Amino acid sequence: MDAETRANLEAISVATVSMQLLKRGLRNVSMVGPKALNAPAKPLVGEAYTLRYVPMREDLATPDVLGRADYGPRRAIEEVPAGAVLVIDGRGQGDIAVVGDILVERLRVRGVAGLVSDGGLRDFDECLAAGFPLYAAGPAAPASVAGHSAGDLQTPVSCGGVAVIPGDVIKAGGDGVIVIPRALAAEVGRDGAEQERYEKFAKLRIGQGRPVPGIYPPDDDALADYAAWLEAGEPED
Amino acid sequence: MDAETRANLEAISVATVSMQLLKRGLRNVSMVGPKALNAPAKPLVGEAYTLRYVPMREDLATPDVLGRADYGPRRAIEEVPAGAVLVIDGRGQGDIAVVGDILVERLRVRGVAGLVSDGGLRDFDECLAAGFPLYAAGPAAPASVAGHSAGDLQTPVSCGGVAVIPGDVIKAGGDGVIVIPRALAAEVGRDGAEQERYEKFAKLRIGQGRPVPGIYPPDDDALADYAAWLEAGEPED
Amino acid sequence: MDAETRANLEAISVATVSMQLLKRGLRNVSMVGPKALNAPAKPLVGEAYTLRYVPMREDLATPDVLGRADYGPRRAIEEVPAGAVLVIDGRGQGDIAVVGDILVERLRVRGVAGLVSDGGLRDFDECLAAGFPLYAAGPAAPASVAGHSAGDLQTPVSCGGVAVIPGDVIKAGGDGVIVIPRALAAEVGRDGAEQERYEKFAKLRIGQGRPVPGIYPPDDDALADYAAWLEAGEPED
Amino acid sequence: MDAETRANLEAISVATVSMQLLKRGLRNVSMVGPKALNAPAKPLVGEAYTLRYVPMREDLATPDVLGRADYGPRRAIEEVPAGAVLVIDGRGQGDIAVVGDILVERLRVRGVAGLVSDGGLRDFDECLAAGFPLYAAGPAAPASVAGHSAGDLQTPVSCGGVAVIPGDVIKAGGDGVIVIPRALAAEVGRDGAEQERYEKFAKLRIGQGRPVPGIYPPDDDALADYAAWLEAGEPED
Amino acid sequence: MDAETRANLEAISVATVSMQLLKRGLRNVSMVGPKALNAPAKPLVGEAYTLRYVPMREDLATPDVLGRADYGPRRAIEEVPAGAVLVIDGRGQGDIAVVGDILVERLRVRGVAGLVSDGGLRDFDECLAAGFPLYAAGPAAPASVAGHSAGDLQTPVSCGGVAVIPGDVIKAGGDGVIVIPRALAAEVGRDGAEQERYEKFAKLRIGQGRPVPGIYPPDDDALADYAAWLEAGEPED
Amino acid sequence: MDAETRANLEAISVATVSMQLLKRGLRNVSMVGPKALNAPAKPLVGEAYTLRYVPMREDLATPDVLGRADYGPRRAIEEVPAGAVLVIDGRGQGDIAVVGDILVERLRVRGVAGLVSDGGLRDFDECLAAGFPLYAAGPAAPASVAGHSAGDLQTPVSCGGVAVIPGDVIKAGGDGVIVIPRALAAEVGRDGAEQERYEKFAKLRIGQGRPVPGIYPPDDDALADYAAWLEAGEPED
């Protein structure tokens, strides 16, 4: 993701990204389950590093496994690159925590961009106190080993019902979390910025009493009006 | 709905309306899904104007349809009367938005009383900033065409699992959203006001240490006590 | 529950209790559904007194039953001991209220420790205004008789998917609600206090840049470091 | 239940019983989950004896508990009266068995009328081979202790989402399982028999080409025609 | 739908229709819920006539409404054209019946092609005995008025999670029910017939030991082999 | 898995395996979703080879991907060893097919032991006609690319809510599908055979009129009776 793409994706909203992907035929890109937990939401853009769980089986998921050197979920905390987004496939179980405050602290110290999961968080208030961007299902007391067994790292996962391939771009904010296929990130950022410019104009006109039809989406008159407005230097609304 | 009925329904709580309808044998009138989104909740009373969606089918739901003159969901925004409540059957899909900030702005400008839907809202923070009464499932990035196709306007719908006939009275607040069949609105308002008068008395006595049995519901002694309390001019609790 | 156990269980977090139970092989002890409703959460420890509902049947659940002397749900309000936790099996129906503000007021006046239910609360804002510890599904307008019939008192129940036997110890806070089997309460409190002491140390070290492996769970070096830190008098982090 | 009521309830269909209860305002009496498992279904009428489970908790549900003298689920097998219907509240978990072939064999030997549960059956083929009336969710390998803890006997339960009070009358067949409140059994049987007599006539006329309106439900002409048909001695269709 | 299209659609399988629609970008066309109830399945092709329900509300859904002249669900039975498929939006409630044996008998007598619904059927065995093509959720005792109120006729509906516009073509068989948008029916039939011709060849070669890659989907060698096989006159497998 | 273990596991029932695992503390080993589809069920024992899907994303799941040399789901069909069980994680979506008749034919020709999936099968009747052991959710018309994108091969998966590690032993029959951790297969087989021997005796006694307590589980008298019965050479029941 180059700097211009990053800047574009940071500037536009999650809803705009969703519409740009829909225009390219992608409907199944908005996660169901993970939501912005910081108040206000801490916007997040970054490349996905993935961690996957499978269902708990009593022989595979005991408190002891947490200490093994090859235990994937602990490796993920140390290996996710600074600036990346840790995406944890928590099997849609919002009632099981995927991390707690100690691991969130480690992610923060390491410079990771944020966390996205359809699982829960334990020590919830302490997690929030870290000021780290968190998108997950909400508070949940049980540790991951209470409900999950380790899967693997950096493979395709499901999170919030959406496929995430390592390296895909995550865009998250108050409206939720969207996955942008890596190959589409640049064009989505560019066209999204133009879409938002028009919507600023449209909302201004609607606030002035214009009906929605003709303005949104625009007919020829609206496009001419928009061109004039742009030329006039985008007066503040 | 005459002015007295409106005043009564505005004065009483959603819980009281629910009990009055239960006393008349109506149990299936409280929506599951839509919740008060403004903080604090913005109480809402008004007649229902309905919009209905059906499931998305790729040939019916594309970004292009938004611009068609006969596209029902856009017509609804312009045709819902001032003072009415726009009720959108979002098929119980809280993860798909039924409107965003531009359409909420238009509803506000037009003097619509409020919005009720079992779907979500996109550009959620901007929607809330409009100060318009919103009862829906919460934030959701995907536009309606990502998950719905247009159904029709002003027909019986399901919203939050409850049947809504155009013209029914919507009562909404912090406890949720209730549908009052049009023919029952006047008596529900009148009897609900009396119910709340008694409950104010009952809570006062309970705060003073009276056990619940005998007071709620009242036995003869409690009714006599209540009559005296009323006569004494409803001392403030 | 003796005073030391109570003190330990009040001092430690819900997440710690969950881990202590998991170490003893108990995974199915964390409720799904009830959540902390006061803001901030009002921590709760106490012995469970149980009330159970069964599905509404129109011949069994009418507004009239509320006034009968033997109506279990009303008896529960008067019979739950001061200091105990009223646990209401609301059949996982968060859209049906199990109590409203009048009954919450009575529980508060009687000195009950708190309320836990997988059902909802009506007159939600008034319930919160009482300053009484509430763990339930959220606001819901319909009264219990709209969706439930009376079951019984002080028998084993399901609440939030967890078995609760009368006399079990309830521990609740921002991370949710945990059921501690009565026979395990003392040891869970004692070992949980030690667990939290170590975690305070671990988080301190991680904030100083130590990787998670080796510290959490601890290897021999970490244990030696911890012993030294303890001896040094637990310097504040 | 007297002999005439039993004979009436055996003669009429589950659908007819459902309609008779609906006419009396009872909608929530048809179980969701239990279905006829014998092929063809073995019709069942009898009084309910109830057994209840709560969620599995690892300290309460071990293979050892099966051998304890006071273990409720085993007592139920020996105590349910001959001629009664054993109704097991399996918490809607069709994937957990409530009984297996050995216990079904015991129920058969003891002369119990049948079994109704929203749970599953293990050793499914052997259960069916016993020729005993079974209404449950289907095959499931895990024994009850894998997912349930013992609740109690002969208390109000939920089964398939319906309240069952011990002594209520169970009516089951190919269309499913209905609970008839004990006090209504006689009149439901009597009026149901008359309903079926008319429906036999209605279906005959419709097979002869009559439209449904006017016949079902009947207008005055249809009633006259029906009276004549009855007088003519109910010619076979 | 012309005769050739009908013949093509009758000859090919539901799975083939599904793949042809997917190739045109339509994924959301296969119903979830309705299944073939006749044994063996009675294949069905026809144009959709739609009936819609909304949730039961006690003031709208009583046994009395069945007799009103304008009651939509009864009008649908008389107005659905011979040769058409009656599609009933049963709100995904398989536990509520949308019709019983008397109405199925009337549909059969009137020459309707078949019934598709995500609701249930009452008097299930009698319904099957009519030999009429039935695709629904299974047996259910409660009549429609126990759970639904009347919606309307011949409007867009949801059935099994799929949008159905009156006049769309329904294709149903053992693999389930597919909705073919009216405008695509001819090309789907034509291309589907060619697809099945190739698959017959592919399965023949795989039965002879050929690996799947190269054959399905075909590479150039396989296409040449197929052309030769076709020229040789499609030897029977 | 050695020959004796295989023989033991083939001889005992799925319910017995479930109980043996429960005795070792494993509760979460019985799949929910996959069921025996052949009639009668074709018993299945073999080592698991796993294939995993992630959610459909329109850029990843098109009919074209089926022809790519590296498309995992097609490689799985060729690479699963003869004698192994192909376990497909179909994301619990019974309405999406994971294979159709052509691929089932290839599995049969290659000598694979059977197929287990929580997804559906298309061309269902043709799949069954192959006489190949099938455990899945049922018929479903949409091809995998309609709802899934390719995940990977031979990694830990979830199937029917149970963790499956490649090489685990699958045991399936009329009661469903159980996963036996590889390390436990031998002892489960051995102890299961002894369990069934006793249960044969217990059922014989119960058929002769003995109550369940004392026999199942056995007390000392029953054990003595059993020993004598065994010595007498297990008379046929």
Image: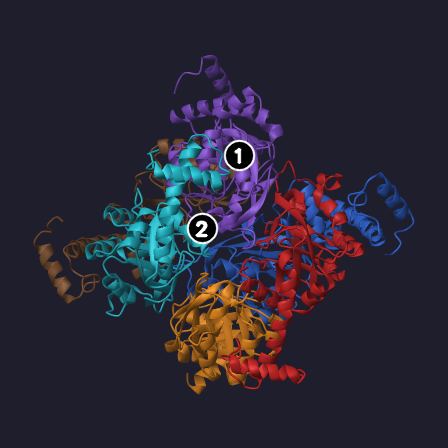
Chain colours: A orange, B blue, C red, D purple, E brown, F cyan
Marked residue chain, label 1: D
Image quarter hosting the C terminus of chain F: top left
Q: Amino acid at mark 1?
A: Glu
The one nearer the camera, E151 or D108, is: D108
Q: Which residue is mark 1?
A: D78
SS at badge 2: strand
Asked which quadrant contains residue A129, the reply is: bottom right
Task: Say whether residue C224 is left or right of residue B38.
Answer: left
Is residue A124 shown above or below F171?
Answer: below
| In the rendered image, the vertical position of residue E219 relative to residue F217, given as above or below | below
Residue F68 relative to residue C53: left or right = left
Q: Name the amino acid, label 2.
A: Ser
Kindly tell me whether residue A217 is visible in this rendering.
no
Q: Is residue A32 visible?
A: yes
Q: Nearer the viewer, mark 1 or mark 2?
A: 1
10 Å crowding of disc 2: few (<14), some (14-19), many (20+): many
Q: Nearer the viewer, residue D12 or D128?
A: D128
Residue furthest right in the image: B232
- For residue D17, the mark is none
Q: Which quadrant of the figure contains the N terminus of chain F?
A: bottom left
Badge 1: residue crowd in 10 Å (few <14, some 14–19, many ≥20): some
Picture coordinates of residue A177 (x, y %)? 49, 71
Q: CA distance from mark 1 to mark 2?
A: 49 Å
Of D53 and E155, which appears nearest the observer? D53
Please give left or right for residue B153 compared with residue C118 in the image. left
Q: Which residue is mark 2?
A: E158
Badge 1 element: helix
Instruction: Return the chain for callout 2.
Output: E
Front residue of this view, candidates D107 and A165: D107
- Which residue sits at x=27%, y=63%? F76
